Image: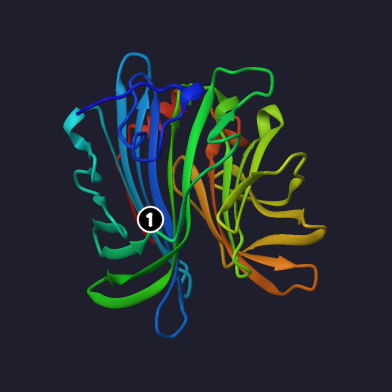
Amino acid sequence: MKYIKYDPKNLASFDDEWMPHAYSNDWWSIGGILYDKDENIYSYQLVFLSLFLKTYILRIGLMTMTDHSTNKHYLRQIPSIVEGSLTVDSSQVGFAGIGSIRRYPEGFLVNAKQTGLSFELDVKNGKGPYRSGDDGIMSIRLDETQDSIFSYTFHDMPTIGKINIEGKEVELTGRSFFKRQGGEYNLMNRDNNYESIVLNFYSGDQMYVQVYPRVNNSYATLFRDGQSYLLEDFDFEPISSVTIDGAVYSNKWRFVLDQKKYMIEPITIGFSNTNFYEQASYIKDAADNIVGRAFTSSLIRARNEIDTSTLRENLLKVYEINK
């Protein structure tokens, strides 16, 4: 598999940064909030990772699906140090035993499968790819240039497809997001763990927020009318948390945009996926009107004292949850 150089001072195009980077971490992830014909809500994620851990590269494939009408959550995680387990070329990324994200000119074809669940989705390009952060780069610490993440995101992606849950086929429509991220940073360092939120307003605006609680740093990027804007001094405040299996995760936030107050609240409940938390949410205005949807992913060490050996052990486990 081809590896390319990571150069945060000369970030290339989305297409040119698609392949994995040598001596770096790489993430390809797609997810969203979908509806069946009865307006029942489903959320999903498909994530592929290549983590550079000094002495070896750990590759992980992960899929999730939640039926919010029943709060039933599906998860499958497979780790591997075998290079062929994760495959990447110019048109697709995939993981053996999990699924794939295949590119075509108008969007992405998404396929995933685990015990009792499979889904096939056609995700159109929507809006993007946008560069998040400071022209595509997010420095984890304000006073350093090393330990940075590059970030490309697609937003408001029209999605159609079907899922098969326990032998029952359900047709779905909705909106998705796609993230292509990576960089030279040590994920074992707690400071480098973050909370990320994708926001999709019904007004047509989108946002991407990435928060590093340990170093009091954050990036908020607004996407409006085909342009991206890095918001300076943006106050994105967590106001509530949930505890799952002894780990604490933020689950409600408030913020101000264009001098208007907003709140992010969970649609039902969020779920812990071994090393991170995911949550489908409403965006509400000051009058408690629902004005959009949001999707949250939080790494477990962003707000928890999990030792490195435990994290490594969890990353190397095969998980399959159907509950």
Residue pushed farthest top? 55
Residue 131 percent coordinates (x, y): 52, 41
| Residue located at (22% from left, 74% from top) | 167
Please name the residue that numbered disc 1 is placed on.
64
Residue 205 or residue 194, whichever sits in front: 205
- In depth, the one of 170 and 181 nearer the eye is 181
How many numbered discs sit on the rendered protein? Answer: 1
Give residue 56's quadrant in the image: top left
Image quadrant in which the C terminus is located? bottom left
Instruction: Give the residue type at disc 1.
Output: Thr
Task: List x then y, in percent, for residue 195.
Answer: 59, 42
SS state under label 1: strand
Q: Point out residue 182 in the picture as x, y percentages from the top left corner.
A: 43, 32
**Residue 188 visible in the picture:** no
Choose top left, top right, bottom left or bottom right for residue 225: bottom right
- Residue 233: x and y in percent read 77, 39
The residue located at (37%, 14%) in the rendering is 54
> Residue, x 26% and y 71% (percent of image)?
166
Seen at 31% across and 60% down, the residue is: 106
Work out whether residue 49 can be spotted. yes
